Image (spheres, rainbow, N blue to C red):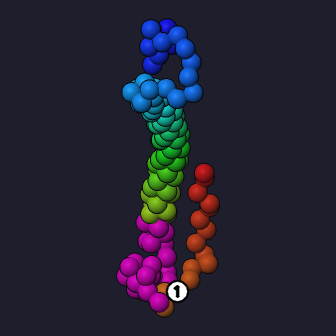
Amino acid sequence: MAQGSDSNDTSYTKSPSPGNKQGSSDDMRKVMRREKNRIAAQKSRLRQTQKADSLHLESENLEKENAALRKEVKRLTEEAKYLSTVLSNHEPLCTGLSHAPSDLLYGAHAPFHQHINVPHYPL
């Protein structure tokens, strides 16, 4: 039997009883509300999945960037050690060092030493 219909009612009239009309209307509202809720839940799950995917990709990209930056820090640290060694080896041989090494490195009037032959640091 159809919902909202009376089992004893065999005639179809244009104006059903007010109680029957109210029950059918409430049932229809429940069905519509459930359908709307189902669609909203579906959209929510989809957004949640998309957000998780996006965060996963961002995490992978940040890990790659972090690894590249760590590699660069290591390379620059090694280059700094190498250049420090070159400078230490050059200081005793340099005749133009009348100032302290810090003045040479940071002073505004530090002489430029063209006689220093430093090969480029291997990459």
Labels in figure, total: 1
Residue 41 visible in the current orientation: no
Q: Give neighbour class at mark 1: few <14, some 14-19, many 20+ (Cα, 10 Å).
A: some
Inspect the image, locate mark 1, and give the three-letter code of the amino acid beneath it: Pro
Q: Which residues are magenta?
A: 87-108
The residue at 44%/13% (across/down) is 6
Residue in the foreground of this view, choosing between 52 and 83: 52
Give the vertical position of 22 relative to 7 (above or below). Answer: below
Q: Is residue 101 left or right of residue 28?
A: left
The residue at 62%/61% (across/down) is 119
Residue in the foreground of this view, choosing between 4 and 79: 4
Give the vertical position of 104 relative to 74 (above or below). Answer: below
Residue 13: x %, y % from top left: 56, 23
Q: Within the magenta stretch, is there residue 65?
A: no
The residue at 44%/26% (across/down) is 17
Residue that protrudes farthest toward the bottom in the picture = 109
Residue in the foreground of this view, choosing between 60 and 32: 32
Q: Within the magenta stretch, is there residue 89?
A: yes
Give the vertical position of 82 relative to 29 (above or below). Answer: below
Residue 117: x %, y % from top left: 61, 68
Callout 1: SS: loop
Residue in the foreground of this view, choosing between 12 and 85: 12
Give the vertical position of 74 relative to 13 (above or below). Answer: below
The residue at 49%/62% (across/down) is 83
Q: Quadrant of residue 7?
A: top left
Q: Quadrant of residue 4?
A: top left
Residue 78: x %, y % from top left: 47, 53
Which residue position is annotated with label 1?
111
Residue 73 visible in the current orientation: yes
